[in-house]
Image (cartoon, grey):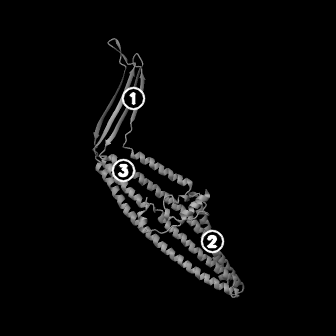
Amino acid sequence: MKVLTLLSLLLVSSSLLANENNASLDVYLSDLKKKQFDYDYEKNNAESSKLRDTWIAPIELNYSYSKSNPNITEQTNQSAAIKMNQPIFQSGGIYYGIKYANAMRLYNDYTIDVAKRKMIKDTVSILMQLKKSELQEKRQILQIKNADINLEQKKEEYLSGRLDSGFLDDAIYQRNLVKQALFDIQNVKEKLVAQFQVLSDLDYKEAPIPHLELIKQEEFLKNNIVLKQTDAQIEKDRYYKNVTIAKYLPKVNFTAGYNWQKSEGQKFYIAGTLRDSSREINYYDYGISASMPLDINMFNDIESIKYDYLKSQVVKVDKQLELTKLFEQVFRNLDNLDKKISLSKENVELYTKLLSDTQDLYDAGYKTEYDVENLQNSLEIQKIDAKVYEIDKQLELLALYEMYVNNGE
């Protein structure tokens, strides 16, 4: 099972944009987290179905039984009834009520989707930061090695009288700084591991990070789950406005019922004669009723709902602007990271040439082993920097993934 999970992760990471949807990165979430979201979806379906069918009136079943002895004999009374008062016309209220329930279901589904994507994004972000911290840890160890080399060189120069103690003190101080920085990196890494284990069942050491690619701004806005949620909000508010208006318009109900009554022991003396009035009867009734409320707050109620609808339209425009600015900021950040990557690659070429030349001079006896090792470490540091910047790019793109769905729904 673990092998299959890792295989699916590798497939996701190699072709993410070809299969971008809610399920594509679900594998990063723990089973408990996924189960919670499944229950949220199920509850939303149940609540929406209940809201959709609220126009269907319940059938009332009544039964009563009583016993008393006010006179000579004990009396019993029983009654039962089945009643229905079903709306059949509400000036469009039934139609818009069903539409509102469906719109509410869609809006709540998107709300759950947004929350789920936020958690997936947080989980993957933590994993990326963990991979980044591993690289930073390796980089810092190389810097410590260079600091140790620098300290040894300063010791030799100080002991030979070619350097005063101030330079030696500075070398010791710099070595302590890079070692303390390593402790900080390791501490942050431990916290990230704890956070990842809360959100995911995967082993962070084995789990690969997904590979994200930049999409076009038009695609990002067209297939944006946050904007789809605002569209659902507008649709929901529009139908609710119509439902509210219909609440104050004429409505017609169909009424029907069936009644049964039975009494026993109903004996009374009338003019000296004992008479029994016990009886059993049953009958039905049906009809139509019409009503229309006259509420002083009707216009205020409708106005209030209308402003909610108008506000939701403004919210969408504002959200589009916010997401456009987010995309532009991510694009600028990616451009800046690309420059840093290019610089690191240039430095790799530079250090590779310097290392080669220094190795030749060392072989000829003009350079020390410290010089070769120092340049070798510096070369590896530049290579690590390029990898760190690549992860930073993925972290930037992850902010877009959180809201992007290329399956269109």
Please tell me whether mark 2 sits on a helix, a strand or a loop: helix
Q: Is residue 329 left or right of residue 297?
A: right
Query: Residue 160's image quarter?
Result: bottom right
Q: Which circle marks residue 351 in the picture? A: none
Name the residue beneath numbered marker 1.
Answer: 80
Q: Is residue 33 left or right of residue 257?
A: right
Check disc 1 and give the amino acid type.
Answer: Ala
- 189 relative to 155, above or below: above
Name the residue beneath numbered marker 2.
Answer: 138
Q: Nearer the viewer, residue 272 or 194?
A: 194
Mark nearer the viewer, 3 or 2: 3
In the rendered structure, which disc, 1 or 3, sits on the residue that comes first in sequence? 1
Residue 168 is situated, as x and y percent measured from the top left of the image, at 67, 81
Query: Residue 73's image quarter?
Result: top left
Check disc 3 and give the amino acid type.
Answer: Lys
In the rendered structure, which disc, 2 or 1, sits on the residue that comes first in sequence? 1
Distance Cα–Cα, label 1 vs label 3: 37 Å
